[in-house]
Image: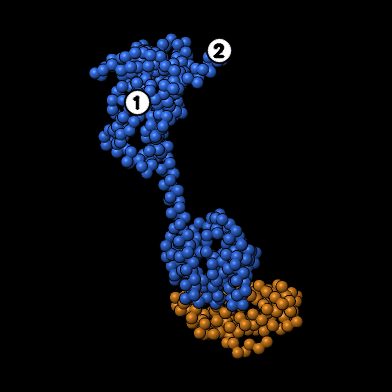
Chain colours: A blue, B orange
Amino acid sequence: MSPGAAVALVVDDSAVNRKVLSRHLASLDIAAREAANGREALELLGADGAGFDIVLLDIEMPELDGYETLAAIKGDAALRHLPVIMISSVEELDSVVRCIEMGATDYLPKPFNPAILEARVRASLAGKHLHDLEVESAARQAELLKTIERQKDELSRFLSPQVAALVSSPEGEQLLAGHRRIATSVFCDLRDFTPFSEAADPEEVLGVLREYHAAMGGLIVEHGGTLEHFAGDGMMVFFNDPVPQEDHVERAVRMAIAMRDRFGDLAAAWAKRGFRLGFGVGIATGYATLGRIGFEGRYDYGMTGMVVITAARLSTAAAPGQILLSPRSHAAVEDVVEVEEIGELQLKGFSHPIAVVNVRGMRERLRTAVEAG
Amino acid sequence: MSLDGAPVLDQAVLEELRISTGDDEAFMRELVETYVEEGQASLAVLLAAAAARDAAAIVRPAHTLKSTSASLGAMRLSGICREIETAGREARTDTLPEDVELARATWEATLAAFAEAGLR
């Protein structure tokens, strides 16, 4: 609010004083509202003093005097910001000192001198204006932060949490622009999904997918994987990007085992409804290019490279219940993972066969299971 | 109490008020009318309080009349009211009846002066 559009509350038990003050204020382009005592003044101010920029307050008044009114205004967090100028006669200067100690901004001697009135009211209004700007700016900032948080929240429903966080981080632009890094790619999909989706009702197909996505989605987040995409029954998840993870291969394997276990529960329930589905996983580790992939209006945060193709081919090659590892993935986790040799597989599009293993489980879990008998 | 030195109506104060409030005759007349209404009420309380020798009850009306009289240039009445207000605050009641009587007489003189100035 500019000082020109300000509104003053004139509190004085004398109608003559109120009229003179209001008239002076009008000549300064300040609108005045009047109260004959403190009680009326507090009623007009309401809960937060909205609509008022300054209070001119007489000291000697019936019902609620200037001290009590000042104490009420300054003791109320929602009114405290209002500047209060005490109206006093020359003999009341001791009282004025007390009022200024109580939080009054200034004082105005009676009879009113228009020049002094203007100087003191303008100075107080400038302070109030500054305060209003600060409040407004703080409110705008809070609103902005809320919007950003809401957008992040909105974004995280469409993107994986890591990518949503990345987009709003300071180094986001650099990472989005594309970079090369060793990463682990995980592909998984359902076996016999195509015949199932042809035979079952669309509602049942969607219901199965929803249960499957909900279960797997939770495990991806739990293990810190970055979900690149869902495609029907297929999912691609990668590790070690955008958040670096020293144990990215182990995380990928642990997630795959947890998915396989969880899938066992789901499959048992589906089997009762007559649906027979299997679950296979392929995991590969190696250098990849990561960053923004797509076109204006629709971008994904993606991973490309031979490692992605290897993981996809391994997933295709996996029998129901298998988690197939590329040689490099296997080498990274051989101390902690129990595997069985599958042998050399000739994957489609690859010039040489590669040695592939199937994950049986994590060593410590298998040992615990054996000890438990 | 000797306040004969102060003018009943200080034309300079009145003139300054007139100019600073926009040289508006109607406003000045309205202001004097308000002053007369308020002053009569204050004076009535003063007279009752003086008759009852109630020092506490005279403080507020004396204070109000002192301040509004000074605003409009009624300096002699303002001075008398200041004396009464002080006496009231100090709980002195001995001279109250004659002081308030002096205020009443000065009030009449003030009204006459406003009439003479064309404001009533």
Q: Cα distance, mark 1 to mark 2? A: 35 Å
Question: Mark 1: which secondary structure?
Answer: strand
> SS at mark 2?
loop
Q: Which residue is at 38% across, 41% downward?
A: A168
The crowding category of the residue bearing disc 2, from other C-alpha atoms within 10 Å (few below 14, some 14 to 19, many at least 20), is few
Q: Quadrant of the C terminus of chain B?
A: bottom right
Using the image as rendered, state which of residue B116 and residue A56 is in the foreground. Answer: A56
Give me the chain letter of mark 2.
A
Quarter of the rendering occupied by the N terminus of chain B: bottom right
Q: Residue at x 49, y 58 (%)?
A: A51
Is residue B5 visible to the viewer in this orientation of the structure?
A: yes
Amino acid, disc 2:
Gly
Residue occupying the point 51% across, 73% down: A20
> Residue A203: x, y in percent?
40, 18
Residue receiving disc 1: A285
Q: Which numbered disc covers residue A32?
A: none
Give the x, y percent position of residue A355: 33, 17
Horizontal side of residue A39 vs A121, given as left or right: right
Image: A135 above or below A127? above
Q: Residues within 10 Å of mark 1 (few under 14, many from 20)?
A: many
**Residue ID for mark 2:** A373
Q: Quadrant of residue B103?
A: bottom right
Q: Looking at the picture, tell me which residue is in the foreground, A303 or A12.
A: A303
Position of residue A235 measured from the top left corner of the image (x, y, whole percent): 36, 23
Location of residue A238 with respect to A65 vertically, above or below: above
Residue depicted at x 38% and y 21%: A330
Of A91 and A300, nearer the camera is: A300
